[in-house]
Amino acid sequence: MRAFFESWLPSPTTANRREQFRAAFGALCGILLTAIVSQLLLRSTHAAAFLVAPIGASSVLLFALPASPLAQPWSVIGGNVISGLAGVACVRWFGDSLPLPVLAGLACGSAIAAMFFMRCLHPPGGAVALTTVIGGPAVHAAGFEFVLLTVLADSILLVLMAITYNNLTGRSYPHQQQNPHANPHATKDAVPTVRLGFKPEDLDAVLQQHNQVLDISRDDLESIFMQTEQRAYQRRFGIIRCADIMSRDIISAEFGTPLEDAWSEMRAHRVAALPVLNRARRIIGIVTQTDFLEHGGLDDYRSIRQQLQGFLRKSGVTHTEKAEVVGQIMTHHPTTAQVDTPIVDLVPLMADSGFHHIPIVDEEQRFVGIVTQSDLVAALYESRFAEAAT
C-alpha cells in the first residue's frame, strides 16, 4: 500500500535552489510587468479585461522550463491565440445548442487539435479555450476581440519579458534548435562521435515507437544521452583531466606580435597554432596556420610562396589596411577548458566541432597549457591500453 501511494509522488527536481529562485522571481517580474503594460495599452481598470488567468500557467513554462518546446515564442503566442479563437468559435457556433460541459470539452479538444496542426502545442492554451466558454457574459460579448486584444497582448508581453529576463540570468531563450552532428569539413561522413555507440537514427526510431509528446527538445535529449555516455566512460576507465595531459611549455604570442615573428615561431617549433595572451597571461585569442592562409589570400598554390612572403613582410608605413600583427588576424575568444576538466569533455569539441587546439586556463582564467588532438588521442589510447592490460 505504501509503495502504491509513493508512486503518486513526483521524482525530486534536479534544479538547485538558485535555479528555483530564478524561475520564481522571473515569473513574479514577468506577470507584474505584463499586467502593468497590458493595463496601460488596453486602458482598462478591470483585471479580466487586461489579464487572463492562463497567462499565469504560461509563466511557469517560460521562466521555469525555458528550453521546453512547449515554452517557445510561437508555442506561447500561437498556442494561446489559436486556442482562444477555437474556443470563441465553439461558443458562437454551438453555444445555444450544447450543454455547458459538452461545450467546454469541445472547445478544449478543438484547441488541442488546432495547436497540433499549427505546431504550437502549449498547455495553457487549453485553459484559454476553457476561459472563452466559462468566462461569463463579458467574455462572450467580446468574442474574438477578447482573443485578438487581451490574450494576444498578454502573450506577446510575457514572451518579451521572458526573452529579456532569461537571457539576463544565463538561460538562452528562445531555445536554439541545433544540428549537433554537422560535419565541420562539409562532407557526407558522420562526425566521429556518432560512428560508434547509438546513432541519431536509433533515437528517432525509439521516439517514434514511444509515440508521445515529450517536454524536451530532441537535440537536448540527444545531448543528455551523449553526456551520459561520457560519464559512464569516466566511471569505467577513470577520470583523466586536462592538467594530466596538457603541454605546459607553450610558445605564445601577444596582440602586437608581428606576423613574420609569429610565423617564424610556428615553423621553428613545428606547431600549427599560437595562443595569444595579454600581459596578465589571460588568453584573448588564438592564431593558426589557417588564419594566415585565409587573411593572406593564399588561394593560388602556384604563387603561394611569393604571396606568403608579401603578406608577412612589413609594409613600412604607419597607417595601412594590411594586417601587420597577430591581433589583426587571430580568432577572438577561443574555446577554452579548465585544468580539472575531464578530457572526455574535449572529445566532442575536437572530433565534431573541428577544434585542433584547446587552450587550458586555471581558476583565475590564466593560460597554463594547451591540449592538442595528438595529446587527446594518446591519452585515450593509453587509458584503454591500461584497461586491457588489467
Image: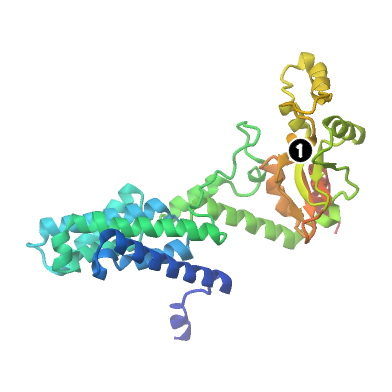
Residue type highlighted by circle 1: Gly
4, 311: nearer the viewer: 311
> Percent from the top left, x then y, of residue 337?
74, 53
364, 390: nearer the viewer: 364
Left or right of 113 on screen, residue 9? right
Q: Quadrant of the C terminus?
A: bottom right
Q: Residue furthest left?
A: 97
Residue 215 appears in the figure? no
Considering only vertical position in the picture, is 155 above or below 191? Answer: below
> Percent from the top left, x then y, of residue 51?
29, 66
> Percent from the top left, x then y, of residue 338?
76, 57
Residue tagged 1: 327
Q: Residue furthest bottom?
A: 1
Scheme of colours in the image: rainbow
Residue 198 appears in the figure? yes
13, 273: nearer the viewer: 273
Mark 1 surroundings: few (<14), some (14-19) or many (≥20) residues within 10 A? many
> Percent from the top left, x then y, of residue 98?
10, 64
SS of the residue under disc 1: helix
Left or right of 115 on screen, residue 239? right
Residue visible at 73% across and 16% down in the picture: 300
Indicate the quadrant where residue 389 lies: bottom right
Residue visible at 79% across and 18% down in the picture: 307
Residue visible at 41% across and 53% down in the picture: 73
Disc count in the image? 1
Left or right of 108 on screen, residue 60? right
Indicate the quadrant where residue 212 lies: bottom left
Q: Residue furthest front?
A: 318
Considering only vertical position in the picture, is 252 above or below 94? Answer: above
Residue visible at 41% across and 57% down in the picture: 159
Left or right of 232 on screen, residue 225? left
Q: Quadrant of the N terminus?
A: bottom left
